[in-house]
Image: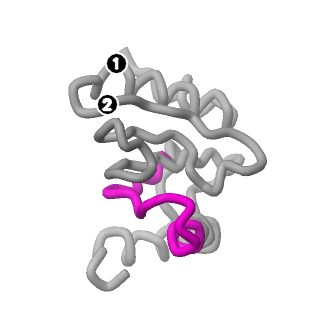
Amino acid sequence: MDYSRDILALDDAELERFVLRWLQVMTSPKYHSTQRFAGAGDMYRVVVGFLTKACLEGPWNNYQCKQPGRRNLGVGSAFLDLGKILHFSHQKKFTLPEQFTFVAPRGLARPLEEPIFNPSAL
């Protein structure tokens, strides 16, 4: 069954809840726990998988969910999100995530593909 239309129809909050549930079900042995940070004060942590009980003081992965209208994910939005994670980790609000994954059902804008697919250049 093809669920792509259903996923594209989700708003931002629904996409975040979908990804959280996916992490809980599909990757449960991988994560100690999961959390969805929503709204003001989320510090650009959206859906998080904690690899240990140390939570944000230990290794964790961030899933940045983006459903930007009917467009794909652009450079400006992506770099703002990455910059904010770097900023808050520099302020010691949390450690840097082990992985930072964009969940962008509409895909990436062409100019964003180069730095994403060449992480050493990023």
Give me the residue at 62% from left, 70% from top. Answer: 80
Relative image position of residue 6 (x, y in whole percent): 55, 23
Question: As drawn, is 88 to the left or to the right of 40?
Answer: left
Q: Nearer the viewer, residue 75 or 101?
A: 101
Q: Which residues are magenta?
A: 86-103
Is the residue 78 above or below the residue 102 in the image? below
Question: As drawn, is 105 to the left or to the right of 77?
Answer: left
Give me the residue at 48% from left, 29% from top. Answer: 20
Quarter occupied by residue 28: top left
Is the residue 9 above or below the residue 92 in the image? above
* Amino acid type shown at disc 1: Val
* Amino acid type shown at disc 2: His
Mark 1 to mark 2: distance in Å? 12 Å
Q: Looking at the rendered structure, which numbered label has been put on residue 68?
A: none
Looking at this rendering, what residue extends furthest in the right direction? 40
Relative image position of residue 50 (x, y in whole percent): 37, 40
Q: Nearer the viewer, residue 60 or 19?
A: 60
Q: Quadrant of the C terminus?
A: bottom left
Is the residue 114 above or below the residue 42 in the image? below
Residue that mark 2 sits on: 32
Q: Is residue 92 part of the magenta span, yes or no?
A: yes
Residue that mark 1 sits on: 25
Question: As drawn, is 20 to the left or to the right of 72?
Answer: left
Question: Callout 1: 10 Å neighbours few (<14), some, many (20+)?
Answer: few
Q: Is residue 56 part of the magenta span, yes or no?
A: no
Give me the residue at 30% from left, 39% from top. Answer: 52
Relative image position of residue 91 (x, y in whole percent): 58, 72
